Image: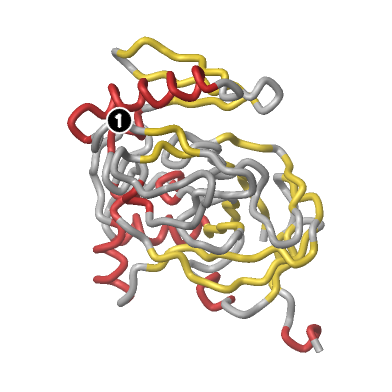
């Protein structure tokens, strides 16, 4: 099996940053993945005491399909976020200043319009990630799984709907769902698979058009009896992972 694409999503719900390689660390996800979010006005998120919250407390594709039309770019060197969307003046926000963070939040509030539940807040907290599960993990999706699901319903599904950190080829469709509890070698890192990824309405959104034009959760339940596509894995031995690297499940007998 082969790593085909590595992605991180600096801002929850917004566009990916494609990486040629990444250094994984034990007990952590990809660096800067879901580091930021836009908290809805009624969100209880407290940056002084950050805890994991469900995605509905933030701008997200599950509830706000139109955020798929935003093109964002985060420059870690300058700590600057660029936000662009058709019909809206672009914004370059220096996140190291209160004014920059407030400007980014105001931009998103205006963009969401009636979908904004009060004034949004730009959310960040040291060491906190705005991921869909509380555990820090790497998400992986097999391309064959996406292709088979789409083929069953006569539609080519863009794998980006599933917002994985790692897209890989070479496995049978949905084979990765059987890796729960197993370790995998991913480039120079070792991970342990611990959970299937249950899919929600976010995957209904076309990442190119920002329209809800498919029903992956419904289709999965109808065809397979569950809504799972992809897996989560924890990093147990860090290392470098690059596009083109091998991905291999470790045989149980080799684990002792």
Q: Position of residue 116 (x, y in %)?
A: 25, 34
Q: Quadrant of the N terminus?
A: bottom right
| Residue for point 79% across, 84% down | 255
Query: Where residue 80 appears, x then y in whole percent?
Result: 59, 21
* Residue 124 spot, x, y in % from top left: 53, 39
Q: Quadrant of the C terminus?
A: bottom right
In the picture provided, is 36 more to the left or to the right than 2? Answer: left
Determine whether the residue tagged by mark 1 lies in a helix, strand or loop.
loop
Q: Which residue is mark 1?
A: 119
Asked if 111 appears above or below 186 in the picture, the reply is above
Q: Quadrant of residue 189?
A: bottom right
Residue 253's place in the image compared with 108, above or below, is below
Tell which of 215 and 236 is nearer to you.
236
Is 237 positioned to the left or the right of 152 in the image? right
Q: Residue at x 52, y 58 (%)?
A: 141
Circle 1: is it few (<14), some (14-19), or many (20+) Cα within 10 Å? Answer: some
Q: Quadrant of residue 168?
A: bottom right
């Amino acid at each position: 099996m082969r790593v085909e694409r590595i992605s991180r999503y600096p801002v929850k719900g917004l566009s990916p940053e494609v990486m040629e390689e990444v250094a994984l660390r034990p007990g952590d996800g990809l660096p800067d993945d879901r580091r930021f979010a836009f908290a809805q006005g009624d969100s209880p998120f407290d940056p002084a005491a950050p805890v994991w919250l469900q995605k509905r407390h933030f701008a997200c594709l599950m509830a706000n399909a139109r955020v798929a039309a935003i093109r964002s770019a985060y420059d870690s060197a300058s700590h600057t976020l660029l936000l662009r969307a058709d019909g809206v003046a672009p914004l370059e926000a220096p996140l190291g200043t209160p004014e920059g963070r407030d400007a980014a939040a105001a931009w998103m509030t205006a963009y969401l319009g009636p979908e904004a539940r009060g004034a949004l807040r730009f959310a960040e907290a040291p060491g906190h990630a705005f991921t869909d599960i509380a555990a820090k993990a790497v998400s992986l999706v097999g391309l064959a799984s996406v292709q088979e699901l789409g083929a069953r319903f006569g539609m080519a599904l863009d794998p980006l709907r599933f917002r994985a950190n790692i897209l890989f080829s070479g496995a049978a469709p949905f084979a990765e769902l059987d890796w729960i509890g197993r370790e995998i070698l991913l480039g120079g890192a070792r991970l342990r698979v611990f959970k299937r990824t249950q899919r929600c309405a976010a995957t209904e959104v076309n990442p190119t058009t920002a329209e809800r034009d498919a029903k992956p959760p419904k289709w999965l339940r109808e065809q397979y009896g569950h809504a799972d596509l992809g897996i989560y894995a924890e990093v147990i031995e860090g290392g470098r992972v690059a596009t083109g690297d091998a991905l291999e499940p470790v045989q149980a007998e080799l684990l002792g």
